[in-house]
Amino acid sequence: RRQRQMCIRDRELPVGEYLVCRIEAETFEKLVTIALDQAGKYLFGTWLPAHGLTTLPFSAEKYYRSNESDLYMEVWVMPLPVQEQESR
């Protein structure tokens, strides 16, 4: 099990431009449920369309927890203009 965790931790992202959405919550459970759901709805349903963007079918999540009061995650997506996505 330990070897698998190291593999996941050591992954490298593909080279490219990313949009990074930082998400914060009071507890880890709220972070990965309520806050992640709300952030996803805003990012994909509001922010990206308002900027004429969509994303490649790829995302990465990075979790940070230095202590109980400093708990957040980042969702990394690769933006793509809507016109470019429609031609694929």
Image: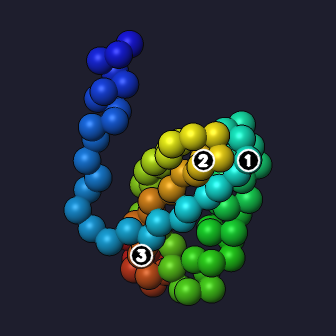
Of the two numbered discs 2 and 1 on the same chain, state the one appearing first in sequence.
Answer: 1
Identify the amino acid type marked 1: Glu
- Residue 61 to residue 51: above or below: above
- Residue 25 appears left or right of 70: right
Quadrant of residue 40 within the rendered picture: bottom right
- Residue 67 to residue 83: above or below: above
Look at the image and tell me whether residue 62 can be seen.
Answer: yes
User: Where is mark 3, residue-wise?
Assistant: 80
Identify the amino acid type marked 3: Leu
Identify the amino acid type marked 2: Leu
Q: Which mark is residue 71?
A: 2
Q: Residue at x 28, y 41 (%)?
A: 11
Q: Residue at x 47, y 66 (%)?
A: 20
Quadrant of residue 85 within the rendered picture: bottom left
Look at the image and tell me whether residue 33 can be seen.
Answer: no
Q: Which mark is residue 86?
A: none
In front: label 3 or label 2: 2
Residue 53: x %, y % from top left: 51, 79
